[in-house]
Image (tube, rainbow, N blue to C red):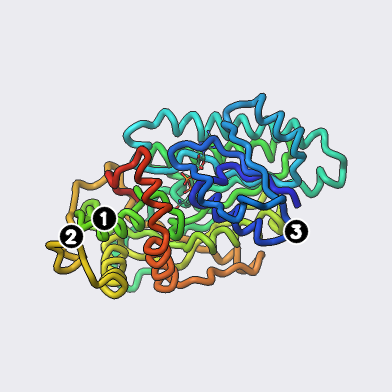
Amino acid sequence: MKILVTGGAGFIGSAVVRHLLADTDHSVVNLDKLTYAGNTESIPSALHSPRYVFEQVDICDAVELDRVFSEQQPDLIMHLAAESHVDRSIDGPGAFIHTNLVGTYTILEATRKYWTGLPPGKKAAFRFHHISTDEVYGDLPHPDEISKGEALPLFTEETSYAPSSPYSASKAGSDHLVRAWQRTYGLPTIVTNCSNNYGPYHFPEKLVPHIILNALAGKALPVYGDGSQIRDWLYVEDHARALVKVVTQGEDGETYNIGGHNEKRNIEVVHILCDLLEEMVPTKPAGVNAYRDLITFVKDRPGHDVRYAIDASKMTRDLDWNPQETFETGMRKTVQWYLENKEWWNRVLGGEYRLGRLGN
Ligand SMILES: NC(=O)c1ccc[n+]([C@@H]2O[C@H](COP(=O)([O-])OP(=O)(O)OC[C@H]3O[C@@H](n4cnc5c(N)ncnc54)[C@H](O)[C@@H]3O)[C@@H](O)[C@H]2O)c1
């Protein structure tokens, strides 16, 4: 299959591209604008692969999208390109509206034009797979707020949308656009909504790499509010495997929730990372006795969602997918990766970002 991946130079997109290139049945067209979050060094396996093409294109540029579709003739599209960082959406929502809404509309229209002209066999097998987030559902009750014995709810594919941040609202809008193009024009689409990812090649402003790199530098480990917010963590390679299953085997018009069954409070995540670093890097920066001593509680994010948790049983039932990593094995692999890939993150830190903000 020739698969066009948008945002393939980002954190999850690069994991998808690496995963696709590892399978000789697939070739990849990576369409990415290369914003501050995009980095082609995250796909070392692409460098010499004859099954890989890179197109530096903005998803808001309809003329360029038409050119790429007509030159590359993809069988499937996986749409990951987005502005993705909640804190940035609070500081400056405009880019999120533009890329996530106008960009998704623009690529849907380009896809519709391309798909309409395909021969019948290729047209029937075609899928536009939109990659989205569990944050579109808003948040769930926290165990601290629920009486003992009461079951804790999970997000299912039927949960109503109630986004809280400019980021999640823009992703919710893009999900609605995709479903409207399916219903109105018959474009074969699939939507996936996934929980928080962590793993290799993660941009250092997100919680997990931020804590690892700040701890290694002997800097404060800032935690929003009291750190009680709960996220459901998924190792990025498990997400990539799930996405490839969905785009190649998923049903037209369906939605699939993807999650790791790993609900953790933010403060627990920080403690686990500190403890792993105590074990793996016992020699600490000057003046640091214990990594946990670096934890600093900072003013909470406005509108901060208290809990996300995914019911991923449809993925298991319909597509036989389950995460391979537990939280413990995935976190250990992640810390190990950051320890072994200083060159990658030093170059990222050499750019616009300077270990400045925390998000998840
Ligand atoms: N990170 C998570 O935990 C998570 C969880 C669930 C869903 N998602 C979704 O998965 C997708 C990928 O997330 P990520 O964490 O890899 O994001 P990321 O910010 O790391 O990467 C986004 C990529 O999109 C590219 N891009 C941005 N604007 C573009 C434009 N206008 N045209 C073309 N390319 C553009 C960037 O250059 C970058 O390579 C997003 O749609 C996000 O909403 C992320």
Residue 290 position (above or below residue 38): below
Residue 259 position (above or below residue 252): below
Q: Which residue is mark 1?
A: 214
Q: The disc labelled 2 sits on which kind of residue?
A: Leu
Q: Tell me, yes or no, whether the two marked residues, 1 and 2, touch with CB atoms within 8 Å.
A: yes
Question: Which residue is painted at 35% across and 65% down in the image?
Answer: 264
Q: In x, y percent, where is residue 102? A: 54, 29
Question: Which residue is painted at 32% across and 53% down in the image?
Answer: 210
On the question of residue 14 being in view, the answer is yes
Q: CA distance from mark 2 to mark 3?
A: 47 Å
Q: The disc labelled 1 sits on which kind of residue?
A: Asn
Is ligand 1 less than 8 Å from the beta carbon at label 3? Answer: no
Question: Which residue is painted at 31% across and 64% down in the image?
Answer: 269
Q: CA distance from mark 1 to mark 2?
A: 9 Å
Q: In x, y percent, where is residue 55? A: 63, 37
**The label number, if any, that marks residue 25 in the structure image:** 3
Q: Secondary structure at mark 1?
A: helix
**The label number, if any, that marks residue 294 in the structure image:** 2
Q: The disc labelled 3 sits on which kind of residue?
A: Asp
Badge 1: residue crowd in 10 Å (few <14, some 14–19, many ≥20) = some
On the question of residue 357 being in view, the answer is no
Viewer-proximal residue among 44 and 268: 44
